[in-house]
Image (cartoon, rainbow, N blue to C red):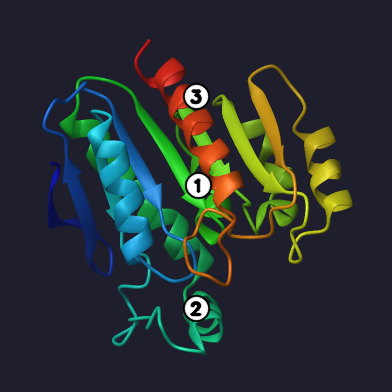
């Protein structure tokens, strides 16, 4: 069972907390997992454990660390509004800079390759981070900021996998199809999950689409295996 702990990475304005999940049988490769709008939630930590069980060292930066009270009650009726509030209160450049710092720190600890996996808000942050540093793979689940980041596409050279639900109420299908055209090149994959909405991988009853989640995760693991273990 992977053993989690919390380390810190120096930033110009303080110490960035990073949740670290170390595998029992390391492969030498690693993943920086980027949170959704609800912070480093129980769901995000569970996905980090899943990746660590595959042999990856996983680092999850706490992107809301500058906000004194940044907890999200995952059982509260106002969970979504609270997540949106915290995201709005977090400077985008700080979030990308924190993720970049986590990537470079993880790279310094490993002998193998480093990839990025991001969910929702974290999918966009991961994409913007991949534009600033070389990573071996990028996986984005319904990256909510991607429509505003397409000017970075020439700088994102990593192989990338993008998961989308056909019934995403936050990002219209035609918007995603336009992104697919802009990002079209060798090594970029867009995968559509029929009937799934936004945040379909999150097990919360408001979002979960078990069939889409069950289809997407093996695809993610196979993609990471191809590009991080080669």
Counting residues from the N terminus, which is met first, the one under dot 1 or under dot 3?
1
Q: How far apart are marks 1 and 2 (CA)?
A: 18 Å
Residue beneath disc 2: 83
Residues 25 and 69: in front is 25
Q: Name the residue under label 3.
A: 223
Q: Is residue 215 above or below residue 189?
A: below
Secondary-structure class at tag 1: helix
Residue at 74 percent across and 45 percent down: it is 194
SS label for mark 2: helix
Q: Mark 1 points at which residue?
A: 126
As drawn, is 162 to the left or to the right of 230?
right
Residue in the foreground of this view, choosing between 199 and 96: 199
Find residue 35 and report its image quarter: bottom left
Q: In this view, does 7 lie above or below 114?
A: below
Q: Residues within 10 Å of mark 3 (few under 14, many from 20)?
A: some
Marks 1 and 3: CB-CB under 8 Å?
A: no
In the rendered view, does 176 fall on the left or right side of 112? Answer: right
- Residue at far top of view: 230
For the C terminus, which image quadrant? top left
Depicted 86 relative to depicted 142: above or below? below
Which of pointers 2 and 3 lies earlier in the amino acid sequence? 2
Q: Which residue lies furthest to the right in this view?
A: 174
- Alpha-carbon neighbours of circle 2 within 10 Å: few (<14), some, or many (≥20)? many
Q: Residue at the location (63% across, 20% down)? A: 187
Q: Quadrant of residue 167?
A: bottom right
Which residue is at 84% across, 51% downward? Answer: 173
Q: Position of residue 21 (x, y in %)?
A: 19, 45
Helix, strand or loop at mark 3: helix
């Amino acid at each position: 069972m992977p053993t989690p702990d919390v380390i810190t990475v120096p930033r110009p304005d303080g110490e960035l907390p990073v949740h670290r999940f170390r595998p029992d049988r390391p492969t030498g490769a690693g993943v920086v997992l980027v949170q959704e709008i609800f912070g480093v939630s129980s769901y995000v930590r569970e996905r980090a454990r899943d990746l660590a069980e595959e042999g990856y060292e996983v680092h999850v930066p706490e992107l809301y660390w500058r906000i004194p009270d940044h907890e999200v009650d995952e059982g509260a009726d106002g969970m979504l509004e609270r997540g949106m509030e915290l995201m709005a209160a977090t400077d985008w450049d700080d979030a990308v800079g924190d993720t970049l710092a986590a990537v470079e720190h993880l790279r310094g600890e490993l002998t193998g390759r480093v990839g990025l996996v991001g969910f929702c808000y974290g999918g966009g942050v991961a994409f913007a981070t991949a534009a600033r540093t070389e990573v071996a793979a990028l996986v984005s689940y319904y990256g909510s900021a991607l429509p505003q980041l397409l000017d970075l596409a020439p700088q994102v050279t990593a192989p990338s996998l993008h998961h989308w639900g056909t019934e995403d109420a936050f990002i219209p299908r035609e918007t995603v199809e336009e992104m697919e055209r802009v990002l079209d090149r060798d090594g970029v994959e867009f995968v559509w999950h029929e009937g799934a909405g936004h945040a379909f991988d999150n097990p919360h009853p408001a979002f979960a689409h078990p069939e889409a989640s069950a289809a997407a995760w093996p695809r993610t693991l196979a993609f990471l295996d191809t590009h991080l273990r080669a």
